[in-house]
Image: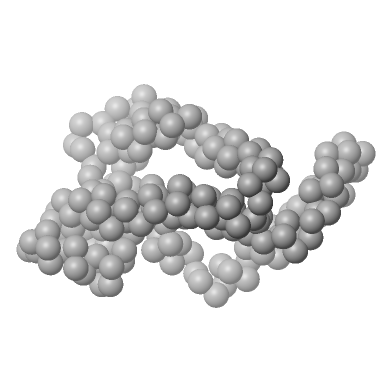
Amino acid sequence: MTLLVLVHHTVLAYCRYGHFNRKHYLWSSAPIIDPHRWIGFDILQDFNDTYFMSLTFLVSGLFVLPSLQRKGTYRYVKDRIWRLGLPFVVCVTLIMPLAYYPSIRQTGADLSFGQYWLGYFTRFGWPGGPAWFIWFLLTLDLMCSALIRLWPMLPQKLARVPDLIVNHPVRCLAALLVAACAIYLPVLVVVGSEQWFRVC
């Protein structure tokens, strides 16, 4: 799966749908867009997008409860901050500025790397790039830890969910849609669709 993630982000520069936005470089489909593109990479991206991020979160989630039970909340959270929080900070402070510097230069900005790096955290948007996955996974881990700490019986209650889905599929789908809209739509109204680019 790690190899798929690397391939996915590597070929973004070579997809036919790739575009570079000179007015706002963060709205480009990738930091650099190569003039030589191939439809095969479009097909690969489209296929990968159907499953691989969801699968990555699922696989990670499968290990949360056993790890929490084995380590306890404090050790688990400390471990997650060390394994996810630290790599995220390193990525967004060192790696992503290197990736986006050529991109901002393509907009016509005449900046040294030092000037860009200092402005990267304020006026240039501080994009996380592919590291969005790391901070989001850390957030989910922290939320899960807090929920299980507050409601220790939650895992046993959630274990009944598969039976509910099998016995009442239409009701479960309706409940899922209502819950998704109740969570997503207020955030969309408050934050707006364009702000997601800054978050990711």
Given the current orientation, which residue lies at the most extreme right position? 167
Kindly identify the residue that appears in the image at 44 percent across and 55 percent down.
85
Q: Would you identify the image quadrant in which residue 149 lies? A: bottom right
Relative image position of residue 182 (x, y in whole percent): 70, 65
Q: In this rendering, would 161 be left or right of 177?
A: right
Q: Residue at x 52, y 55 (%)?
A: 78
Residue 186 sits in which quadrant?
Answer: bottom right
Instruction: Answer with left or right where residue 135 lies relative to residue 12.
Output: right
Residue 24 position within the rendered picture, expressed as x and y whole percent measured from the top left: 27, 62
Q: Nearer the viewer, residue 83 or 23?
A: 83
Residue 20 visible (yes or no): no
From the top left corner, tell me how far across and down residue 197 is, in percent: 40, 60
Q: Is residue 62 left or right of residue 21?
A: right
Q: In which quadrant is the C terminus drawn? A: bottom left
Image point (87%, 43%), residue name: 160
Does the image show residue 160? Answer: yes
Whether residue 17 is situated above or below residue 141 in the rendered picture: above
View extreme (bottom): residue: 190
Above/below status of 21 relative to 186: above
x then y, percent, for residue 185 = 63, 66
